[in-house]
Image (cartoon, rainbow, N blue to C red):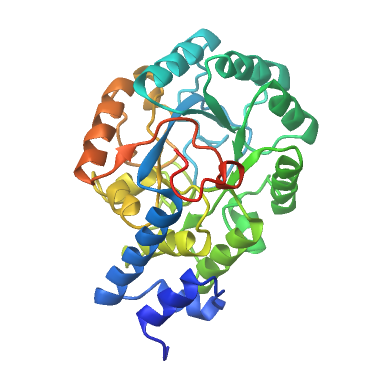
Amino acid sequence: MARTIQEWMTGLKAGELPTVEELAYLLTVRGDDSRLLLQAADSVRAAVMGDAVHIRGIIEFSNICRNDCLYCGIRRSNQTVTRYRIPDEEILETAAHAKEWGCGTVVLQSGEDPYYTAERISKLVRAIHAMDLAITLSLGVRPRAELAAFREAGADRYLLRFETCNREQFARLHPDAPFEERIRCLDDLRELGFQVGSGFMIGLPGASLEDLARDLLFTRQLQLDMIGCGPFLAHPDTPLRESGQLPDKSVYYHTIALLRLLNPHAHIPATTAFDALDKESGRNRVLEGGANVFMPNLTPGKYRKLYLLYPDKPCVDEEGGACMLCIRGRLRALGRKMATGRGDAWRLTNAGGNNA
């Protein structure tokens, strides 16, 4: 490519839209060019989203799933998993602790568990809403009528990854979850007034750099409020257990940096899987390369080891309070602070800088 990295960064900051080939090149830059890419992303994050890091506590309340995705540890066919559902009162107790610990948002996450009807989820949402917490749901694909019930009950946000925009790859990985159905659900969420989050996996087996570049462009096309992406890590008890990591780890971090440059107003979390990729430093590196959200696992300790979507998941031996102490220390070391408040979508707060 004839352009220098500085010229690329100037163009991206000005809103230029690169081609697939250009993005594939930027994913693989090395040395000083890599450093400049990460610095450019972090400068956009600081200018647009501010230095405060929004804390969104995750409660993984059920590991029962009707789907059979080829890489996921809680897939329907995995007979080695001890299944659980956290009782409602324990979910609410954990949410109350989340507020005490400084979280502005509670994320209710589960497999696609048919037990949790619209009525059951709405009851939980109403109780947490009364705690003056923002509520994100991550429950998989749901019918529009159920999504409408969640919204009416007080749910603010919904997270549903599209995983990859390559239809063939998606169908291979998700044998019982059509891509079109997932996109339809994202459209329903937007029309119902949710703050919408989605994203993809970095380093899918068989995916090229051009495929990853197309995912970056598709993400921008969706105009998301939050973008959650992380490294592909196949669970050892799945058909894709022998799939390895990308040979160049910098591609994972360049992906997040490019997400920030292409989507300056989106909330971008440093997802937990980055600490599985680079133990104890992965999420720090993402926060230094464009991310502005941290999502600690607040699931009670006796359930944590049972919600293993991928191998080497960090913090499975801790309780929520210990995770929050760790986060405070990590942010201090990075010269960042915990945000206060809900951390709603930039388009709603329109605060320009720090929407804490």
Quadrant position of residue 54: top left
Tell me: residue 3, above or below residue 116: below
Depth check: give the residue in front, 79 or 36: 36
Tell me: residue 205, above or below residue 284: below
Question: Farthest residue in the bottom direction?
Answer: 2
Q: Position of residue 270 (x, y in %)?
A: 39, 46
Q: Residue at x 47, y 44 (%)?
A: 238
Quadrant position of residue 141: top right
Depth check: give the residue in front, 43 or 218: 43
Q: Residue at x 41, y 21 (%)?
A: 98
- Tally of numbered tags: 0
Q: Is residue 158 left or right of residue 354?
A: right
Which quadrant is home to the C terminus? Answer: top left
Q: Position of residue 68 (x, y in %)?
A: 59, 41
Q: Residue at x 62, y 56 (%)?
A: 170
Q: Is residue 291 left or right of residue 31?
A: right
Depth check: give the residue in front, 288 or 118: 288
Tell me: residue 100, above or below residue 305: above
Q: Position of residue 266 (x, y in %)?
A: 52, 51
Quadrant position of residue 310: top left
Q: Is residue 279 left or right of residue 174?
A: left
Which quadrant is home to the N terminus? Answer: bottom left
Q: Residue at x 42, y 20 (%)?
A: 99
Q: Is residue 4 left or right of residue 327?
A: right
Q: Position of residue 181 (x, y in %)?
A: 74, 47
For residue 209, say whether it is visible: no
For residue 191, say whether it is visible: yes
Question: Farthest residue in the right direction?
Answer: 145
